[in-house]
Image (cartoon, rainbow, N blue to C red):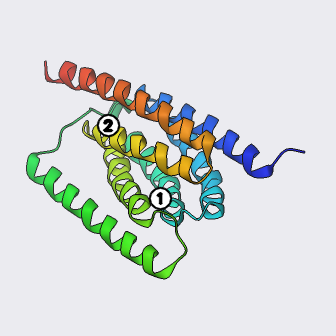
Amino acid sequence: MLDLNLVIEIISVVLSLAFLILLMRENIWCWSFGIVSSLLSIYLFIEAKLYSESILYLFYAVMGVYGWWVWNQQKGGVMPVKKWPIKKSLIAFGAGLGIAAGLGVYFKNYSDAESPFIDATTTSFSFLATYMEAHKVLSAWMYWIAINATSIWLYQSRGLRIYSLLMLAYAALSVLGLYRWNKQFKSQVI
């Protein structure tokens, strides 16, 4: 008999891969795949006692709607790739650290969470990177490379092997996404 959690994990991973590939191609349909995958993932992360990840995937579902809306507002359906100024980037990074510390302390002291500080850090910076994705900020891909590499270990440590493999694929595809969006950014400037 098939394990329901395994079936949900596999479906979510397939939808997540579709999301990332469509995102790299700047296809607005990426958001619909991301929303459904995120909703399935929430249950799995609660089961694995990765509570910050559960919050993150709820955020992903909400940001999927937001991302769809933002991308849909663009004239001609095309949103340019952009770079943030250094000051804005530093403020965002500081906010990411602050949120990570707050989540980590909370879940360490008030829950049975596993790896609360690593979980909180990947979650916090995923909030930031997802917002940046919705606005096509090039440096979002650099965050994703680091987040995905860390998440490989985090998910493996909780027995989520398929998600761990997904993060391996995400890390590699994030490098490709950075390359593609950087190429698009350079073509806009010329």
Inspect this view and state whether residue 28 appears.
Answer: no
User: Relative to the observer, which residue lies in front, 15 or 110?
Assistant: 110
Q: Residue 56 carries which label?
A: 1
Q: Mark 2 points at which residue?
A: 141
Q: Earlier in the sequence, mark 2 or mark 1?
A: 1
The quarter holding residue 75 reads top left
Q: Residues within 10 Å of mark 2 (few under 14, many from 20)?
A: many
Residue 137: where, in percent of width, then height? 26, 40
Q: How crowded is mark 1: few (under 14 residues within 10 Å), some or many (20 or more)?
A: many
Q: Which residue is drawn at 26% across and 68% down?
A: 98
Residue 118: where, in percent of width, then height? 40, 58
- The Cα–Cα distance between marks 2 and 1, rounded to whole angstroms, is 17 Å
**Count of numbered badges drawn on the protein:** 2
User: Relative to the observer, which residue lies in front, 121 or 36?
Assistant: 121
Tell me the quadrant of the picture where the C terminus can be found: top left
Q: Which amino acid does label 1 sit on?
A: Leu
From this view, report whether residue 111 is shown above or below residue 158. Answer: below
Q: What residue type is labelled 2?
A: Trp
Residue 38: where, in percent of width, then height? 57, 51
Q: Work out which residue is located at the far bottom of the displayed protein and give it.
A: 110
